[in-house]
Amino acid sequence: MRPQSFDGGVDRPIAEKGETTGRVLVIGPYKRARGDADAIASSGLRNSEARLEEAAGLARAIDLTVAAAIVAPLNDIRPATYLGKGKVEEFIALIKASSVDLVVMDCALSPVQQRNLEKEWGVKVLDRTGLILEIFGRRAKTREGSLQVELAHLNYQRSRLVRSWTHLERQRGGFGFMGGPGETQIEADRRMIGERIVRLENELKKVQATRRLHRASRERVPYRIVALVGYTNAGKSTLFNRLTRADVQAADMLFATLDPTLRALILPHGGKAMLSDTVGFISDLPTMLVAAFRATLEEVMQADVVLHVRDISHDDAEAQQRDVDAVLRQLDVDPENSHRIIEVWNKIDTFPVEERDNLANIAARRPAERPVFLVSAVTGEGVDELLSAIENRLAATKVTLDLSIDASDGAGISWLHRNSEVLDKHLEQGRFIMTVRVDETKSDLTKSKFGAVPSVH
């Protein structure tokens, strides 16, 4: 069992002056795949090295120094410690030799397993769910994001309460000398956590109500919603900045963006939509986080177009796609049958020309209802074609009208530019002949205002 060292330059965060980062050992306790090696490879399952690197990346995302990362193959999961007894003892020496302060287990541990491992190793142990919660806790900037993270964290902690104060084994309750037993410390802690959870849920209901009001106001304008989804670090925020000319944080790290951001998206013919950048998904995303962030992800559920951004250069691109599809299904968006989804293969600038042409051929063979667009969010390659595809998808529910307007009607022409997409406009005998595309909700208003007729083009 050779540890994979992550003590080199990129993996050791540079601390501020006088600041230190904790040293962590990352363990990948992955069950051995059974069956033919070729069949396993063709199944698209993630390989252990890629899973381990992702776990190390999660640790680095909260400025931990990854001293070593090791795959610990398992035949069976042990109820008491997850790992076998021999593996547990083997890691004791490595933990002491590496002077680590924390061990990250890239799996979901039960409270009993976590407690037993901490006793055996004498250091803090964090499982995958706990590590993701820590990242989310640091990334949340808005009030809404903080509420959602705290709610998820409390639900996680409630099942992991242990007796920390033996002198508070049981308090006496009731009146007189024969008062019955009161609450244990654990019961008191659970009650307080439960009360806090109820308060947070009530506050989040207010947040959801506010979001519904904002959505209703957008529908009156109306603005169509385009949502970006994808695996964490797929380049969503970089693409968001490219499409909207915004300056949302985009970094080469997992979960660089947590709080949702909306910006106006200008379409090729002058129309507008709202582009939403959402939190990145990840394999084994804790269910409690999906539930807690449901209010944030409502933009995805309500979106007219969903851009599924994929890092096509990643070794596990296919597995990442399946993980995103699984989360979309939890949000009641069927990735197989949804006409709203446009797949975006990002980071094509990392490929040589020959491989890029091969990707283009693969994308061209995809069915028309599930198109694929190759882009580079960094260089801007393919972005114009993607914008046209978004516009065409949004236009599927719009009406195209022909109009003839007096050239002196400046107010009417201005109204059309604000409330429709002007596809064609030319002057004939003192009148503007215009072809415009309007939302169904404004079709009748436009017809009555200008005497428009459906376009025959």
Image (cartoon, grey):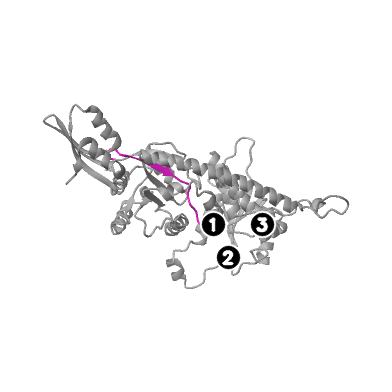
Q: Is residue 26 above or below residue 224?
A: below
Quarter holding the N terminus is bottom right
Magenta extent: 268-284
Is residue 278 on the magenta stretch? yes
Mark 3 or 2, which is nearer the eye? 2
**Which residue lies under the disc numbered 3?**
94
Q: CA distance from mark 1 to mark 2?
A: 12 Å
- Residue 12 at x, y percent in the picture: 57, 45
Pointer 2 residue: 73
Q: Residue at x 45, y 40 (%)?
A: 213
Q: Amino acid at mark 2?
A: Pro
Helix, strand or loop under label 3? helix
Q: Residues within 10 Å of mark 1 (few under 14, many from 20)?
A: many
Determine which residue is flagged by label 1.
52
The crowding category of the residue bearing disc 2, from other C-alpha atoms within 10 Å (few below 14, some 14 to 19, many at least 20), is: some
Q: Is residue 258 in view?
A: no
